[in-house]
Image (spheres, rainbow, N blue to C red):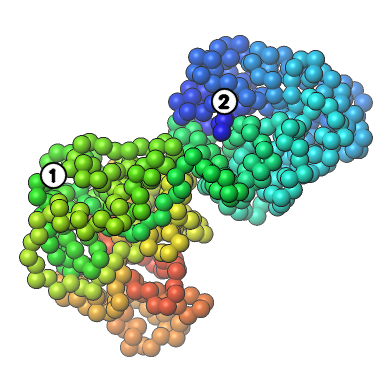
Amino acid sequence: MRTSIATVSVSGTLEQKLTAIAAAGYDAVEIFETDLLSCAASPREIARQLDDLGLTCALYQPFRDFEGMPGELRQRALDRAERKFDVMAELGTDRILVCSNCSPHSLGEHDRIVDDFRALGERAAARGVLVGYEALAWGRHVYDHRQVWEIVKAVDHPSIGILLDSFHSLSRGIPNESLAEIDPAKIVFVQLADAPLLSMDLLFWSRHFRCMPGQGDLPVAGFVAELLKLGYDGPLSLEIFNDRFRAGSTALVAQDGLRSLVAVHDQAERLIGKRSPLPPPSPIGGIEFIEFAASDEEATRLEPLLAGLGFAKVGQHRTLQVDRWRQGAINLVVNREQRGFAHSYDIMHGASICALGLTVPNPDATLRRARALAIQRYDDGTPRESAGMPALRGVGGSLIYLLRDTATDRTWTDEFRPLQSHAEGAGLERVDHVAASVDIDEFLSWQLYWTALFDVAKQVELDIPDPAGLVQSRAIEGSDGAFRVTMNASGGRGTLSSRFIGNVFGAGFQHIAFTTPDIFATARTLAANGVATLAIPGNYYDDLVARFGLADDLVAEMAALNILFDRDEAGNEYWQLYTRAFEKRFFFEVIERRGAYTGYGAANAPIRLGAQSQFRAEPVA
């Protein structure tokens, strides 16, 4: 697969864009005309920079308002094309995008459009140029790639072909199967873009909300799969219009784009039963452990909270200052080492969640897939690495350790000396989910990280009201529910997720949810152990009686224990409570799922955020 990206997709000057695109590892670029026109360097100088960077210019675009123009406007359009061909010669590219006409002057007569492209084809042939005709989803007369294909067939000129853009086709709901009618030899170029499903004007949707394949909701992999079935072997290129991307990190967006191309091509090959060179996305068996980085002093303050939650210190690392705390199937690791990764993480962020240990069938295969996706491996020669627990860089610089799902017991027995404990526990059984807070500009990036590497799927994105602004939230889950992570981000500086990023100097995991079979028994144990839970306003409980018809005495007990409640349309229930945050860095949730409830208590999220906002001005303990 040859990879390309349009310069409009990333931020910066043209020179900065090209440098970042080359560093990310693309083969080629599309030069967007506005980027060139606003650049002080000449086309020949840009061509030299491309050559120095090891890039080629795969396409020059766009050429607008060409076909169907009346009178002297037709001749002017052909003359403009000659000027474009001059620029292309200096850039060293032989392909140009002509998008369907949006001018109010244009005429939609089929024969006139065919004649125009025949005339353009003759001029293009004389200059060694291939013209790719693209159907803009909002084109005045031509807005469907099936229309373009009929025109290209009628033109029947070797220099005129079709240019396909997944957004223009999928945004109009055009079936991917319709691509099977196209002669692959006439496909000049392919552009890919995804987008969230939104109900709005097509032009506005396209210009502001496109995203990388896999970051949105459109069936881009199916689009690519149909092209591969046809035998298309040309470049796959990204053309992304997104306000955040064009204001964000040039390097990050370029890197995400290449990752998305690798992932969508791999997914498309699997859809058509073709053997992919990449290992398949790995299922996650679950979270084997969660690691906290802490100094000795911070650990002294953290340990009473863990003990109050019912965890017992059951192991001490044989060679490191690392303790294992356990309850049910939950393992928490507190790393107090004064060197190495956790120590550096603690210096940067303070006591915080620094790593997850995930079980997978084959860590080596997951590493190979990560390498192909340009996901960085972490290796500092620690005992964990040598013991067969490789790690990848994760959100906010945290680590994702990969454990073989059949060898987790050995990890604990080999590395940890057992300690005796008589703790009775609080009824917590397993990790239900972890929640990460990330910068709003990285929200889509981290979703792509998980979905490209592992066999997980995105759930419906939610907007959750925080007293200081809206929070975007999206859950990512394995098919069996054994692994769940939620990603939260906000543009509001005062929201909880933004305050967390400010408090810990970067993105990271903000809370952990544990399951219990009896939330009332667990809540009473936590209260007896002195664990401070998040106080929920009385108005919330007054409303519960009306909304769900709960008994007064039940609601009274819920209020006394700060338990929240939700019920879905099928009658499945979700009970939850929250601890106060540990030094404004992370907090814990306890949940009980009754029936087949699959959500996260979204209806209660504004209540929780409002309650947490009451402690905004409170100093860190």
Give amino acid for label 2: Ala
Spatial separation of the CA atoms under disc 1 and disc 2:
46 Å
Compared to residue 204, the image places residue 188 above or below, namely above
Residue 400 image point, x, y percent: 31, 47
Residue 38 image point, x, y percent: 60, 20
Location of the N terminus by quadrant is top right
Compared to residue 191, the image places residue 430 above or below, namely below
Is residue 471 visible in the rendered image? The answer is no
Location of the C terminus by quadrant is bottom left
Tell me the mark number nearer the camera, choosing from 1 and 2. Answer: 2
Q: Secondary structure at mark 2?
A: strand
Residue 319 image point, x, y percent: 9, 46
Circle number at residue 28: 2
**Residue depicted at x 42% and y 42%:** 369
**Residue depicted at x 29% and y 57%:** 406
Of 533 and 362, the residue lying toward us: 362
The residue where tag 1 is placed is 337
- The answer to which of marks 1 and 2 sits earlier in the sequence is 2
Is residue 2 visible in the rendered image? The answer is yes
Give amino acid for label 1: Glu
